[in-house]
Amino acid sequence: MDRIRRQQIDVPRRTALDFGCGIGRTTQALVFHFERVCGLDISPTMIREAERHNRFHRACQYVLNCEPDLSRFKSGSFDFVYSSRTLQYLEPELTLCYVREFIRLLSPHGLAVFQLPSQENTTFRLVAQRRVAASLRPPGSRQSDDPTSRVPMHYVPRARIEQAVLAAGATVVASERDRCVDRRWMSHRYYVGKPRTRRPFSRS
């Protein structure tokens, strides 16, 4: 929200969606910026925990959604859609489906902000580090023994995200590097809105 404010982009403050809310920490933080906030997750356990810790019952609700879309919500339902450290665990085609849904859910002056790895980092140094680590593994050990490889990570190239956004009738207002994942990946945060006159972010 500070980043958006510094760039002088006005976002309506009525409704917000936290996609992949987990136990709802970010969802409840968004209550201080929006009148009503909805946290959404595919895990019943996470939703139960989020409800148990909910301090803003009138302004904050949690929804379980196991569908490959967000059809439970009407188009234009949210002024702000946020997602971080969630899309990277989905298959690329499903990620693109949800990105299109984010855009469908945006109000005319709304903004979607989401994070996603854009490519694997294959710099020489990291490749060398992997080779050294592999050579030091005990005989017979498997790659899956590494805790960082237990959950599959997926990425979608920036160009493909931009194409999907444009095809859905929206614009990537900006994209910037973030550090939501480890050094094996290059990750970006995207700011997406439906076309209107706005001061653009500086790209980085």
Image: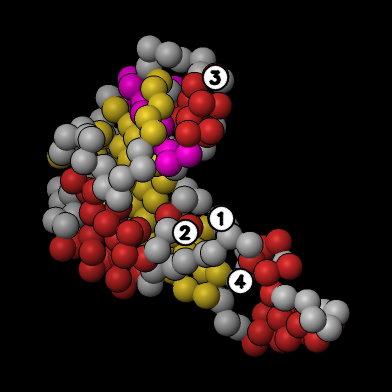
Measure the C-alpha gap from mark 2 to mark 4.
Answer: 13 Å
Mark 3 or 1: in front is 3
- Outermost residue on the top side: it is 58
Whether the residues at callouts 1 and 2 have beta carbons within 8 Å, the answer is yes
Distance CA(mark 1)–CA(mark 2): 10 Å
Secondary structure state at the residue bearing disc 1: loop
- Percent x, y for residue 39? 41, 32
Name the residue tied to disc 1.
180
Find the distance from the CA under tag 2 to the CA under tag 3.
27 Å
Q: Is residue 63 visible?
A: yes
Q: Are marks 2 and 3 in contact (CB under 8 Å)?
A: no
Left or right: residue 122 versus residue 3 is right
Residues packed near mark 2 inside 10 Å, few (<14), some (14 to 19) or many (20 plus): many
| Mark with earlier residue (1, 2) | 2
Please determine whether, in this image, residue 124 is positioned above or below residue 26: below
Pick whichever, 186 or 143, lies toward us: 143
The mark nearer the N terminus, 3 or 1, is: 3
